[in-house]
Amino acid sequence: MIRAGRLCRGLGRPRPLPLPAGGSAPRSRQLRTGLPQRRDLFRDLEKEVVKFQKKLKESLPGSDWDPLGTTKGLPPERADVVIVGGGVMGWSVAYWLKALEPRRDALRVVVIEKDPMYSQASTVLSAGGIRQQFSLPENIQMSLYSAFFLRTINEHLGVVNEPPIDIQFNPSGYLFLASENGAAVLEENVHIQRAEGAEVCLLSPAQLKKKYPWINTNDVAVASYGLENEGWFDPWSLLTAFRRKAMSMGVFQCFGEVTSFTISSREIMMPEGELTFSRINYVRVHMPNSLEYQPVECSLVVNAAGPWSQKLAEMAGVGIGPPDTQEGIKLPVEPRKRYIFVWHCPDGPGLDCPMLVDTTQAYFRREGTGGNYLGGLSPPEEEEPDIQDLEVDHNFFQEKIWPHLAHRVPVFKSLKVKSAWAGYYDYNTFDQNAVLGPHPLVENMLFITGFSGHGLQLSPAAGRAVAELILKGKFMTINMEKFSFNRFVSGEQVLERNII
Amino acid sequence: MAAPRALQECRAFPRLLGARRPYSSAPCPDPLKGGILRYLCNRFYDIEYLVGWCAKLRYRNLRRKNAYYGYTKEIYGDNVAAAYFVLSNRGRVRFQGQETWFCVDWRGKYSSDFLQLRDVPVVAIDLSGSVLNYNGLDNLVKLTALRSLDLSRCPHVDDWTLSRLHVFKDSLEELSLAGCPQVTERGLACLHQLEHLRRLDLSHLPSVPTPGLIQILVEEMLPQCEVVGLAPDSGAQTSRDGREEPGVPSGARRAGEIPA
Ligand SMILES: Cc1cc2nc3c(=O)[nH]c(=O)nc-3n(C[C@H](O)[C@H](O)[C@H](O)COP(=O)(O)OP(=O)(O)OC[C@H]3O[C@@H](n4cnc5c(N)ncnc54)[C@H](O)[C@@H]3O)c2cc1C
């Protein structure tokens, strides 16, 4: 039994295979004299089994049907699209690929996620906000599309015979405050937002005070408030809805970690010099808690690994060439730790409390109706916390956030922090905006990452854009050429002013 | 496509039929509703497709009934288009300076007199029990003089719909959301925009988890407004006197409609 097992494992990939019935020789036989002959017989049998397996496989070219069974949970051996990262971006792309594919089961899509508990994924650790108050028209359009998608989510993601989806949307709006210095920029942003069709209104300090008497408007010059399609929702519900629908449409889910790619590359002389173009042929997926791995042959890889997407890109050779060359340009997306604190304040702002973004960029919102609030603040560039783990620095609240809160909302002078957590932003250090579309040199890797803290809300639109790129070859709904990787090569920033 | 799958599953049929026997001792949670349809859907692409298609048809129908009356609006203006929309959804509508409501008779017919009232603003709309949803509001958002809006017992009015009512913030005084199954406290929170609201009927909202607390919070948010119906003690009384309007032929209204 043991020997046969070892032999089978040597066949190609290391996976324990169940044995054919003939392989189970009782131990007691070893004492008999006829042992050597039997050994030969078994050796022959094992060889025959190998031959038989090979023949079976050859008789069915292009299929990964395995006559001898497989370990549960392994990804298929071949797939058209492998999506690395099972966060909201990954599942959104998977759903849209299935929704837009020309006929049923035209594509085989696999989503690979390393952590079945989603303990570090930013999707489930986010604040869940959705807003149209961006400065870049593309972001506003994406957010408007996402709001439409979330509103009609049951038409898109409803599964036959399953209860309807409730993402628990709180349509309470975002309220941005600007001081004297920021007033002009805020007003300009609101003009852009209105031109794109967002319902945003400007409030003077007096109007603000009348509407929200609990705000201290002393150093506020102007405020903007999103009237429609803004607020917050439950990230888990959206992720599960995407996942459930995509799986019901035939997407494979696999828990395992992508550790390397098998790449073929060739050098081509271009006007700007010799460039190395490469293709990913196999994605190597390691199964959790075991030494097993499976190479998945694929034609496209979608990098939806969120904060870890730079690491994944490096596995495909992005950014490991000599500096100053195209091969040396890294994907500028890195994990940045951000805290969210939950506090209790019995006399705090009431039901009308919006997602408030202070002049200092500190933000908070109501959490439920029990007098709980939730908020955070991005630290300045030079004080970025260590990203080794997701430990929370409670001093950060006391020293950096609370003074701002207490200044803006005087009742917050007395509050009690109840809990806190940290998550990683998929932070684009180049221009704090998304990276969408293929890599110029690694031809079959597509990015959908770098959202820098507003990815959750853009996921329906961004996933659709990438699926369109894969299936139609170009963006159909919203043109997002701006977000391509090429801007890191040319050095042109696509700046977003409203990053929280 | 379903054929091989169907063949393969033929053997499972006796089990399926077994599950349907009413006196079966096996624990079978509501076989007719969840069980059989789910079973068939899981096993036959065709049936799954059919059920999915039915759902799509329902959504299409809903969209059709909430369509934007752009053509009417172009010819007759916002008020008439809104009235037309309301009447086609078996609601009723009152114009400024008029005592009587325009309403539909029991066959769903209505007189077209309202077409004459081009420039008279609509002040009250009763869409109770209709299929109005977020999209249907497209037809109403231009009514700047709307003072009373009754959306009670509308199954498709949800929090998204409520978030759009801010357009009436300068005029709306009376709003009823009684018996809307999808309305939750999350949507009620955005009614703070309606500064002129005097009366808000929130009785029988099954999706609001803690009516007592929410009543207090809503009252706090809308200090000048009388909020009725959320807390259990006031619920019964308001649902009766909630919609007493002058000149309503209440008996003839909406006959043939399923009472909520
Ligand atoms: C504190 C905080 C607050 C936020 N607030 C908001 C907000 O209010 N509104 C908003 O829109 N957005 C917000 N965001 C941002 C938003 O959460 C992210 O932009 C979004 O979730 C990104 O989704 P993703 O799928 O790309 O990444 P993730 O959800 O992080 O998913 C990536 C997944 O890839 C997996 N993975 C990584 N490497 C591998 C590998 N090698 N093999 C297999 N799997 C791998 C990881 O396990 C992970 O599950 C917030 C983020 C944080 C941290």
Image (cartoon, coloured by chain):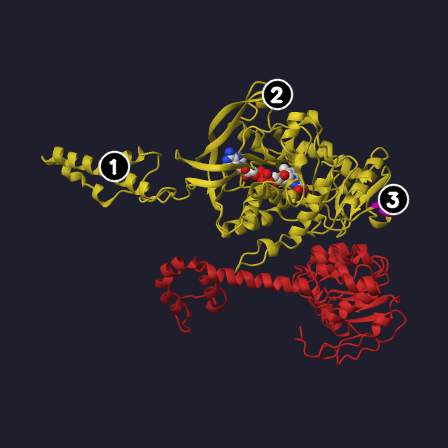
Amino acid type indicated by mark 2: Glu
Q: Is residue B71 above or below residue A468?
A: below
* B42 relative position to B61: left or right: left
Q: Colour of chain B?
A: red
Chain to which the residue tagged by mark 2 belongs = A
Amino acid type indicated by mark 3: Ser
Q: Residues within 10 Å of mark 2 (few under 14, many from 20)?
A: few
Q: Position of residue A210 (x, y in %)?
A: 86, 49
* B188 relative position to A268: left or right: right
Q: Which chain is yellow?
A: A
Tell me the SS state at disc 2.
loop
Name the residue located 81 percent from the left edge and 44 percent from the top edge.
A224
* In contact (CB < 8 Å): disc 2 and disc 3: no
Chain to which the residue tagged by mark 3 belongs = A
Q: Which residues are magenta?
A: A202-209
Mark 2 and mark 3 lie on one chain; the one further toward the N terminus is 3
* A171 relative position to B25: left or right: right
* A292 relative position to A39: left or right: right
Q: Identify the residue position indicated by label 1 in the image.
A: A4
Q: Position of residue B150 (x, y in %)?
A: 77, 67
